[in-house]
Image (spheres, rainbow, N blue to C red):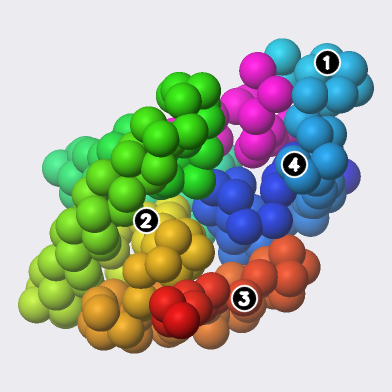
Amino acid sequence: MTLKLYYAPGACSFVPHTLLEASGQAFEPVMVKLHKDEQNSPEYKAINPRGQVPVLVDGEHVITQIVAIVSYLAERFPQAGFLPTEPLARARAMETLVWMNNTIHPTFTHIFMPQKFTDNAAAQTEIKGYNTQIFRNLLGELQALVHAANAADRPYLGGTQFGPLDAYALTFLRWGSLAGINPADFPDLQAFVQRIAALPAVARVIERERLQLNLYKPAA
């Protein structure tokens, strides 16, 4: 076995984790406990000096960053169809993937870890509240992508086969519930995510990471 994925339960590493599981290729999943600061241990920093997950190790090669890892896995396992092969369709899928990675994902970071952006407690509260509304709007955009896929009779956001866009959409809706956004406010997106979660490969990863999809708790 040469493939190894360093992941953290519930983190964005869920995306390549599901792709590897769906590939049918043997790989070793290695959990990194962020709450125990294992990402900053000397051992992990020797693998990824930035102290982030995910990290994909293929033999002697170490690959970091979601977009790079997804692109590599799509080329490594072309039979899985994680990304379209037709040039324009692939560009559209990558366009959405990069938007997810550079817009939706950082917005949630402002909600979940506002301390990264200021040490002022009052400002942290403002940052969190402001970005929660932005994140809600972005979930609306994700639901619009589901509508577009349905209208085009595409079973998945990237095309005809499961891929990174689907896993990322699941991750974002779950994160939204953690931020106090009710998934039921986006019924079509929620239905899509539930269908993705039921795919055997995705279900295995959910079980391995011990994830609860809906973490929303109504305000008392």
Labels 2 & 4 near each other (Cβ < 8 A): no
The earlier-in-sequence mark between 1 and 2 is 1
Considering the numbered disc 4 on the image, is that residue within a helix, a strand or a loop? helix
Q: Is residue 56 magenta?
A: yes
Q: Which quadrant, please, contains the N terminus?
A: top right
Residue at the location (37% across, 56% down)? 165
Residue bearing the label numbered 4: 34
| Residue that carries the numbered disc 3 in the rendered image | 212
Amino acid at the residue labelled 2 = Leu
Q: Position of residue 180 (x, y in %)?
A: 41, 67
In the image, what residue type sits under mark 4? Leu
Disc 3 marks which amino acid? Answer: Gln
Instruction: Tell me which numbered mark, 2 or 4, is placed earlier along the sequence.
Output: 4
**Residue 71 in picture, x, y percent from top left:** 46, 36
Res 181 label: none
What is the number of the mark on residue 46? 1
Mark 1 / mark 3, whichever is N-terminal: 1
